[in-house]
Amino acid sequence: MGEVSNNTLQAVMFDYLQSQKSGTVAESENAMGLLLRWFGEDRDITELSPVQIEEYCSSINDNNVDSSATMKSLKKFFSTLYKNEIITLDLSRYIKIRKRKTTIASTGQGHEEQFDMLTQEGWNKLEQEVEDLRLRREDIAEDIRKAAATGDFSENAPLDAAREAQGKNEGRIREIEETLKKSRVMDSKSIKRRGKSAAFVGSTIVIKNRTTNKQNSYMLVESSESNPKEGKLSIQSPIGRAIYGMPAGSEVEIQLPNGEANLFYLSSIK
């Protein structure tokens, strides 16, 4: 897929369809037509946000008995645009294919995994934490052996405490292992290339509360790295969800945990 003359949805789609193999054009044209009617042919494709894509997909899923073919075509479309640097955010990640109920066992073919993105610092911290927890296993096991050596299991507070510590330790190990399994490190090149165009994981943002006039700087991270005191804001937080995928200069109204609705201004993205 080559460079396009402009970023309108119609121009980008035309260039994309021209690059497709003849056997897949008809299926792609159907999906592209639906997308074009929804957003309009003159829409700047670089301004589409994850929220808008999710809303569109929700509409298709609700009105199409079998939308899987359409969604697969759209995922391929946006993935290609991202790989060719026509868009700076991989919008294919926000296209969800609704699974149909079936009794047939899945073969796993065509399955595309979705990963959370962690900063290198966040990944390293989790790896270090899980290593420390694994080393604690022997110490906890020794505590259990000592407490059990008394032979009294009816009211043995030290034994109960040691077993509780073991349960918490193993639970945290499993939690971190699962997080690392479903995550990937966001490389610095991707952050540098995409970071200033929209707010996403790895972006450093400056937001101003229009209601209180307070301004704060945060790095957007996955929930596993969240630590507001260290300036790390989860994309699953109320503010994070509202500004994710939005360009600098955007204003969003956010319902805070205390019930108040405040207006926030996204001043800059680095």
Image (spheres, rainbow, N blue to C red):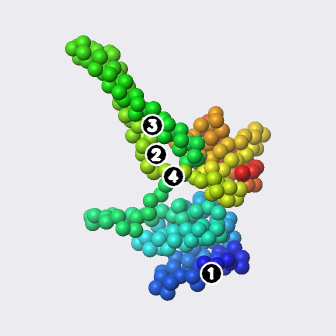
Give the amino acid at mark 1.
Asp
The first of marks 4 and 1 along the sequence is: 1
Q: Which numbered disc covers residue 15?
A: 1
Instruction: Determine the secondary structure under disc 3.
Output: helix
Q: CA distance from mark 4 to mark 1?
A: 31 Å
The first of marks 1 and 2 along the sequence is: 1
Q: Are marks 2 and 3 in contact (CB under 8 Å)?
A: no
Q: In the orientation shown, which residue stands out farthest toward the bottom?
A: 22
Instruction: Determine the secondary structure under disc 1.
Output: helix
Give the amino acid at mark 3.
Val
> Which residue has dot 3 on it?
130
Please name which of the two marks, 2 or 4, marks the residue nearer to the observer.
Answer: 4
Residue 252 drawn at (x, y percent) = 69, 51
Decide if residue 267 is on the left or right side of residue 185.
right
Q: Residue at x 43, y 49 (%)?
A: 181
Q: Residue at x 65, y 45 (%)?
A: 219
Q: Residues within 10 Å of mark 3 (few under 14, many from 20)?
A: some
Q: Residue at x 54, y 65 (%)?
A: 92
Residue 80 in the image: above or below residue 198:
below
Q: CA distance from mark 4 to mark 3?
A: 17 Å
Q: CA distance from mark 2 to mark 3?
A: 11 Å
The first of marks 1 and 3 along the sequence is: 1
Give the amino acid at mark 4.
Arg
Q: Are marks 4 and 3 in contact (CB under 8 Å)?
A: no
Residue 77 drawn at (x, y percent) = 55, 72
> Which residue has dot 4 on it?
184
> Which residue has dot 2 on it?
179
Q: Quadrant of residue 41?
A: bottom right
Q: CA distance from mark 1 to mark 3?
A: 48 Å
